[in-house]
Structure formats: structure tokens, C-alpha cells
Amino acid sequence: MQSVHIMSAYDEELKYLSKRIAAMGGHAERMVEQAVAALVNADPGLAQKVIRDDAVLDEGQREIDDKAIIIIAKRQPMATDLREIVGAIRISADLERVGDLAKNVAKRVAAVTDGRQPTSLFRGLEALANLALTQLKEVLDVYASRSVDKIGFVRDRDDQIDAMYTSLFRELLTYMMEDPRNITPCTHLLFCAKNIERIGDHATNIAETIYYIVTGEQMPAERPKGDKTDKISVSATLPVN
Amino acid sequence: MADLDAEQKGTAQALAVRLWNSRWLLIAGVVAILAVYALAAISAYIVLAALALLLAAAMLPVSGTRQSAESAAAIEAFGLQRLSGEYLAAAVADPLIIFDRTATIVHANAAAFAAFGGIAPGLSLSLKFRAPEMQALLDGVLSGDVASDVVDYTEKLPVERAYRVSASSVGHGTDLYVLVFKDQSEARRIDRMRADFIANASHELRTPLASIAGFIETLRGPARNDPAARDQFLQIMQSQTGRMARLIDDLLSLSRLEMKPYLKPGTEVDLRETVDSVIDSLGPLARENSVAVERDYADGPLDVPGDRDELFQVFENLLENACKYGQSGGRVVVSIARSDAGSEPGIDVTIRDFGPGIPEEHIPRITERFYRVDVETSRTQKGTGLGLSIVKHILTRHNARLSIKSEFGKGAAFSVHLPTH
């Protein structure tokens, strides 16, 4: 992956950085997975575990920051190495945020599952989470293989996530208007959906960082996009009663 | 001993070895003869003859068990020396990865390529298998704390798979380690399938069941003597039982698909023939809905790797939907085209209707189980809410993509992209 340096210790330090990033990534993936599982299966025990696990990611980020700064100070890296190190700092920050978002979903489990909710409420959220998790997994796989030529999928999937989120937003609004008792769980689910959508955004950020690490260039400018929830209003469809 | 065995060439050396091998017996024999000579005072000639006999016996070639064991060991050593690790790995049916002290992949067998994709020598294992338990497993074995270890590892995406992974070091001082994945997905899935099936079935079957129960009650009570109402109610009950039967069929085929997420490699499907037979089998439905099916196929062979029955079901479900929900358009266009542009060359099968179309906000969701754009239309068209779910499942197994384009009021196009390799 990197060219070999005269100092083998330097190589080992760089390898250690990417290994730590991968470990953080694995943890983040697991947390998101478990947070959504806790929500869908109404499992407060699992939710507590996710909340506790966040400390691992915080610790990981601090360690990577420390190590990266020490390497910069000691080795005065250039070109690829410098990008690799700065990229590691940025990716670890993104992964730490992913952990925070998963933790936030887990925290809402108790509020949402208070009282039995119909499963149809969660089905959309599960599908959204699957999209975001696939995004995260594939991006981290690219980090391992460094094959950035295939990174185009990231943009496509980001669009899919946005479309799914917009649709979910609308669905939850409809549930709330049907029955005011739905408002509490649906509001929490809206935040959960937003969190998961943000996780997808962080995965996209990571992809851009990886592209920069490998090619030394910024990913080509993004076309205008985003979710369309800012334009949704369902008042027009309110039944008159 | 070992050095002597190795130099076993030439008779003299062989004899020396035999003498050496039986030295304790020889010494015991000599001592015994000398003792008899001393005690029984027999003639010295007899003693010498006895000694010569003893020596000759010791020099006779050793035969039987010992020698055959030695030759078996020799065959084994010779055979294993010829055997390369690569051939051995290829002969293992489970995914197997050999890696070095820095967790870098040295060799992965074909099963590992098929199962995990994107595995190449030089890739770091700890970057590829990021799950915490896998990291712990690799760290444990590489640090030398444990010689071998086993963990359960599940991959959730793109299809759920569960493995029992064992890691161990290879031989002594080779600095090589091996990971073997034993697939446990099937057992796990059977458990899940049972739970899922019951949850889905009980939820979705309740509605028709409640309606049947209601009509039975009416038939036994108020409508007891009303033949007209009885006929009407029995009609409704019949359509409800039909719906339950369809639902169970769909749930079962979905469960079966979830049971085996892998595709048997090596079989090719002729898309032209498959799509044609789908159109033929749905001819009656198309006529009933007065929809004309038009074909627009590319020239040349249109083969993709896949399972014919499953792809048949994909196109059947899509065409059936197009005939039912795009009825108002009066026609459906089925086109097969090669798409060599883009990263994945493949074949696109597009089924386009000219009906009311699908509102944009529903498009991302319509492949979810029991998701219905419009509950009323779906009920009257005898939909179960599982058709597109099944389509999506089958396509995932084929590494294929389903893309849906629709403009409200102008119809919808369902496009299946099947990779040719």
C-alpha cells in the first residue's frame, strides 16, 4: 500500500494508524447495526450496550490523533504519507461522529418502544439503515483495497439514502396526523431517521477523504443534491373533519 | 539414530547399522554365553560357535513392521514435499486465507474469493475484517498468546451470512497463519425464517381471517334465510381464502429465497427465451386486462449467468404488475438491451407500462415487504405486497440491480441490470 521507507519503524507506525482506523470502522459498523436492531426488536439491553460502546470509539479517535501528531512531528512526512496521516485524522473524526449518531439512536429506544408500536413503523427505518450500513461497509472496504476507481457508487447510494429519507419523513408525518398518540414515537423515529441519514453522509465524507489520500486530488465537485424534506408539507392532504 | 538411518547405503554400513540397532540384545547374549561358560565349564569351541551364531542372527536384515513403517514415512514425506500449499488450499471447500505476521494476505483459495470478493494477496486482513471479534481473533493469534482460536462471525450485508472462523499458526517458525471459515448461515437462517414467517404470516393473515369469521357469523345469524346475501357472502369468503393462499405461497417462496442466498455458479440463462416464455404464460392476464405486450430485443446472444426459474419469477412478477397497474395505458413494452457502458457490462431488461405511474416518494420504498402504494388498488388486483420484495431478493442473489423510473401520470419503467460476469 505504501512504498517502503528506510526506517521500518515508520512503515509500522503508518500501518498501525490504518489498522486502528479499520478497527474503529468495525466498531462503528457494529454500533449502528446494533442500535437499529435494538430499536426494531425493542431491546433496551442491547441499546445500553451500544451506549457504553461509544467510549471505545472516543478512545480510538484520541489515540489516532495523538499518534498522527507524533508521527508528523518525528518524521516530517511528505506527499502520500502526509495525506495518509491527515486523512486518518479526518476519517477517525467521521467515525467518531458515526458512533455518536448510533448512540443517539440507541438512547431513543426506550422512548420509542414505550408501548407496542406496529412493525410497519420500523420497516422503513430498517431499510434506510441497511442502505447507510452498506454505504459505510463499502467505503471502508475501499479504504482497505484502495481501489478508488470504483468510488462512484458512493454518490449514487447517497442519492438513494436521501430519497428513502424523504419518503420516510412523509410517511411518519402521515402517521402523526392519523393519530396524535403516534406523535411521540414518530418524532423520535424522525430523529433516528435523520441520524441514520447523517451516518450515510459521514460515510460519503470518508469516501472523499480516501479519494484524496490515494489520488492527491479532491473528488470532482458534487452536483446539487440533498434530501427534499425541507419542501414537504402535508397540510394540503389533511382530511377535512 | 536418524543420522545413521540416512547413511544406510552399502552392505557394510547396513550391517553396522543392524549391529548397532541390536546392540543391547547382543551384549545381553554375550554376557549370557560367558556366564554359561564360566559356570558350566563347557568347551571354548562351543562358546565361540554360540557367539558366531549370535552375531550372524543380529546381522540378518530386519524385516516386518519396523521397515514398513519407515517406508510409509518416506512416502508421506516425499508426497507432502511435492504438494504445494496452494493446491492444498484449493482442495478445501471452505473459504481459507493464509496470512503472515503483519496480517497481510499471502494466499486465499477460490472459495474465499467467491465468499468475500475483493480479496487479493497483499491486502491487510485487519482492514478487510473489521468486526471487533475478528480483530480480537487476529490479534490473539498474531501475538502468539494462543496457538489457535475460534470465533463466530456474522456479516449482515449485502446478504446475511454467519461463519465459525478458526485461526491458527501453520507449522513451526513459518510465520504463516491460516483462517478457515465454516459457513453456519443455513442453520441460523432456518431459525430466523421460522420466526419471521410466523410474525409476517400472523400479521397479514389476520385481516382476511377476520373478514371470513365476520361473514360466517352473519351467515349463521341475520342472513340465515337470505339466499341472495348468502351467495354474495360466500363469494367474498372465497376471494378472501384465495388471498390467504396466495399470501402463504408468496411468503413461502420468499422464505425459501432467504434460505439460500448463494447462487450456484456456472449456469447460463438465455434471457430471450426466458422473457418470451414469461410473456406467453401471462398472455391470458394481458388479454383479460386488454393490454398489448410489445417486444423490443437486441440482436445476438443474450445470456447471463443465473438461475432460470428465479429469473423467470422476476420477470413474471414485473410483467404481471405492469399488466395490472398499468392497465389504463393499454400497452406494455418489454425490451432487452446490452449495456456495455459503465463499470459493469451487462444486459438490461426493461418492462415499461403507460399507466398512472408511481408517485416519486414511494419509489424508494416499494421493494419493502407489504409496502403498498395504494392499499385499495393492491387489494382489488389481488396483490400480496410481496411481489417486488421477491424480485429484489432474487436480484440481490444475482448481483443485479433494479432501477425504477416513473413520472406520475406517464407510467413506470422497471429496469433489471444483470451483469454478464
Image: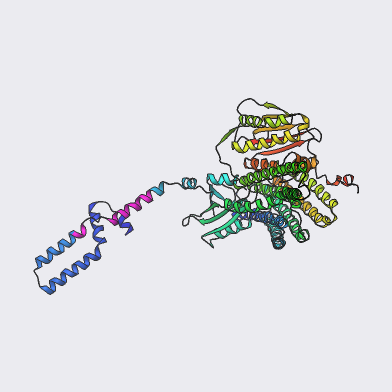
Q: Looking at the image, which is closer to me, B280 or A201?
A: B280
- Asked whether residue B356 appears in the rendered view, the answer is yes
Residue B24 drawn at (x, y percent): 25, 66
Residue B209 drawn at (x, y percent): 71, 49
Q: Looking at the image, which is closer to me, B58 or A113?
A: A113
Residue B393 drawn at (x, y percent): 65, 43
Vertically, is A43 above or below B239?
below
Give the mark count.
Answer: 0
Where is the C terminus of chain B found, in terms of image quarters? top right
Where is the N terminus of chain B found, in terms of image quarters? bottom left
- Asked whether residue B389 appears in the rendered view, the answer is no
Q: Looking at the image, which is closer to me, B365 or A33?
A: B365
Residue ranking furthest to the right? A241
Residue A157 drawn at (x, y percent): 72, 43
Secondary structure that dominates the magenta span: helix
State left or right for residue B196 relative to residue B75.
Answer: right
Is residue B385 rendered magenta in the image? no
Q: Which residues are magenta?
A: B57-78
